[in-house]
Image: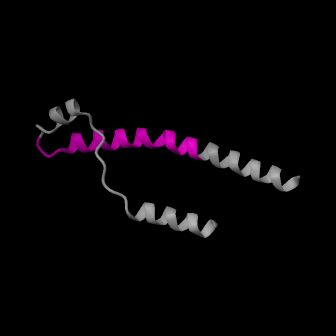
Amino acid sequence: MKLRYVWILVLMLLFTLPIEAQCAMCRAVLESEEGQQTAKGINNGIVYLMIIPYILIGTVGYFIYRNKKKASKSH
């Protein structure tokens, strides 16, 4: 069963798509710039800020799962 979850995780990581997280207003202002360096920086910052809560929730969920599994084994 654990091997199945590992394969699902590997497949999800291999088949990632590039994402753009800019709102319409930010995109309109940043597309007019030459070179698009500022747009790329802002997009990376938005994606970075978006990922942090998911990592935190996943970590907390993992620890809760691990503690419940330990508790069920000890009974």
Q: Position of residue 33 (x, y in %)?
A: 12, 38
Most prominent secondary structure in the magenta stretch? helix
Q: Which quarter of the image is occupied by the N terminus?
A: bottom right
Does 19 sit above or below residue 21? Answer: below
Image position of 18 (left or right of 63) = left
**Along the line of sight, which residue is nearer the eye, 12 or 22?**
12
Q: Position of residue 43 (x, y in %)?
A: 29, 42
Looking at this view, name the residue that lies furthest to the right.
75
Res. 45 image quadrant: top left
**Along the line of sight, which residue is nearer the eye, 37 or 55?**
55
Q: Is residue 42 magenta?
A: yes
Image position of 37 (left or right of 2) = left
Q: Which residue is drawn at the image coordinates 42% and 38% (left, top)?
A: 49
For the record, the magenta segment spans 34-58
| Colour option used | one colour
Q: Position of residue 46 (x, y in %)?
A: 35, 38
Res. 27 image quadrant: top left
Q: Which residue is drawn at the image coordinates 63% and 43% (left, top)?
A: 60
